[in-house]
Amino acid sequence: GQSIVPTSLGAVSTLAAGKRHTCALQQSGDVTCWGEGSYGQTNVPSSLGRVVALTAGEYHTCAVTSEGDVECWGWQGGDVPSEFDDVNIINMSSNESGACAFSDAGDITCWGGEDWLPDYIGKAKAVSGKCIINQDNQVQCWGYNGWGQVDVPLDLGETLAIAYGEKHTC
């Protein structure tokens, strides 16, 4: 079924949808979540502060704050690596059970879930789920491939945007 969208959202700049929950990043930098929240994925931390990027996985939500900190809540998104302390995170993306973040230098770090970032993955211009667009505008993907979601077509060519779903990638 559908959930009821809060009427007090205000102007929204970004939406992030998990398996059964949705979160909105408002233009003010505040985050509001709704939907099924049995794993805490809709419980926005009161200490979060102003947010500049937002992502949601199956049962977790993660945010990049205006200070460049990464915070996650819910199930399988919470063990954020400490290596982000001295790095300027500019964006992030979730997959079913984990998340990846990349810095202004193009460095990418992933955590949670069962698919770890392989050594062949280079610096990123964009990240979505378990795929990146590298510095040469080529797509690189990794992890479980039961539905072909990480098979990159050989003739894909240069890529400007990517979106990863649980069982597909576009």
Image: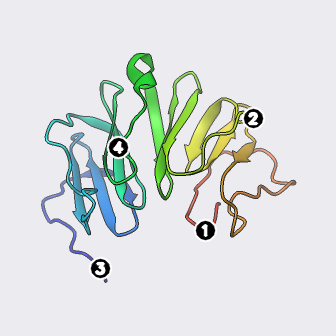
Amino acid under disc 3: Gln
Amino acid under disc 1: Lys
* Crowdedness near tag 1: few (<14), some (14–19) or many (≥20) residues, C-alpha within 10 Å: few
Give residue 120's mark.
2
* Left or right: 152 as drawn, with respect to 91: right
Amino acid under disc 4: Gly
Residue extending farthest to the right is 155
Mark 1–mark 2 Cα distance, whole angstroms, equals: 23 Å
Q: Mark 2 falls on what kind of element? A: loop
Q: Where does the N terminus fall, quadrant-wise?
A: bottom left
Specify which label sits upstream in the sequence, 3 or 4. 3
Mark 3–mark 4 Cα distance, whole angstroms, equals: 26 Å
Mark 1–mark 3 Cα distance, whole angstroms, equals: 21 Å
Specify which label sits upstream in the sequence, 1 or 3. 3
- Disc 1 designates what residue? 167
Most foreground residue, 39 or 12? 39
* Crowdedness near tag 2: few (<14), some (14–19) or many (≥20) residues, C-alpha within 10 Å: few
Give residue 78's mark.
4
Residue extending farthest to the top is 86
- Disc 3 designates what residue? 2
Please name which of the two marks, 4 or 1, marks the residue nearer to the observer: 4
